[in-house]
Amino acid sequence: MEERNIVLDGDIVVGNHSDIRYGIIAKAAILGERVEVSGDIVASSDVRIDIWSHIGGNVKTKENAYIGEFVTIDGRLVVKGDLDIGNDVKISSGFEAKGWIVVRNPIPVIAYLFLYLTELLRMGKDEEVEKALDELFDEEVETIGNLAMIVPNGSKISIDSIRVPATASIGNNCRLVGNIRASTLEMGNDTTLYGSIRTLNTVDLGEDNIIHGNIVSRGDVYINKGTHVLGEINANSIKIHESARVDGVMRAPGGIIFIREEDEILNENELMTLDI
């Protein structure tokens, strides 16, 4: 997360009624209905924007663009490939398309995903369909993809806060700005957050993370080795590795447990013995 843009190595999928107070730089960008994006959208692959969405800057793609009805683009639309555009689309600074231009209402994003799965079934790729469905609908899946950013319906991302209605799942090597507000938080390794964390349920932080703020949770907090929390921790219970560091006060009516390296080695030996 830069000063004005969210920069991704892979794709971004933004759910309906979400508010993104940044620009987006990604491989492919798929936006649902009534999505607000304050800045530019720059994509090296396709851009798909559903009906009634509002883009506060330019939209640029090196491939194809699909723009639904009643979309408003405050800047310029530049498409290197084909442009499929619906009725009543407002583009303040005009548009440029190198390929074919078709004026019609592109299929909604959910219908597009349905047709994609149908085509896989027709080609006999049952395993790929099953895998895709598991990733979409299985609540036990920890991460959707290492190079994809999935923004749930009704989320809000600004320089002040990152608000999601349910679980926030953050991968490795990320740089985030804003105070996270979620039901549950899962974070990978080597991630830096310039903000605080507040959840209703558990907070699970991986290794070697840096949190520039406080952690407040009604549930349990787990902090793995090498992670540094510059603020305080207030939670029901805290389980922290001995190599982790917390600069502020830790408060937990349910107790605080410190994990030592010897305990990890002992647990690994016990597992090896059971396997034998």
Image: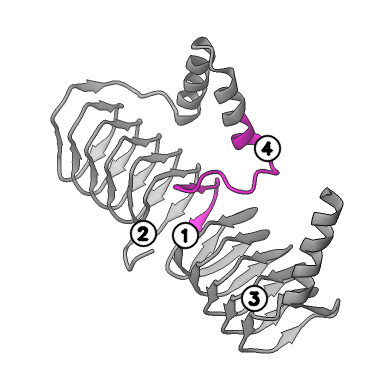
Q: Which residue is mark 4?
A: 138
Q: Which residue is mark 2?
A: 22
Q: Name the kind of residue labelled 3 in the image.
A: Ile
Few, some or many residues within 10 Å of mark 2 (<14, 14–19, 20+)? many
Q: CA distance from mark 4 to mark 1?
A: 25 Å
- Residue occupying the point 49% across, 12% down: 123
Q: Name the kind of residue labelled 2 in the image.
A: Tyr
Q: Quadrant of the N terminus?
A: bottom left
Quadrant position of residue 20? bottom left
Q: Nearer the viewer, mark 4 or mark 3?
A: 4
Please report the bounds of the magenta region as a residue range. Answer: 133-156
Q: Residue 157, labelled with which disc?
A: 1
In this rendering, does residue 235 appear at all? no
* Left or right: 166 as drawn, with respect to 54: right
- 163 above or below 141? below
Q: Residue furthest front?
A: 276
Tell me, yes or no, whether the two marked residues, 2 and 4, touch with CB atoms within 8 Å.
no
Few, some or many residues within 10 Å of mark 1 (<14, 14–19, 20+)? many
- 189 above or below 226? above
Tell me, yes or no, whether the two marked residues, 2 and 1, touch with CB atoms within 8 Å.
yes
Q: Which residue is mark 3?
A: 215
Is residue 143 highlighted in magenta? yes
Q: CA distance from mark 2 to mark 3?
A: 25 Å
Q: Name the kind of residue labelled 4 in the image.
A: Asp
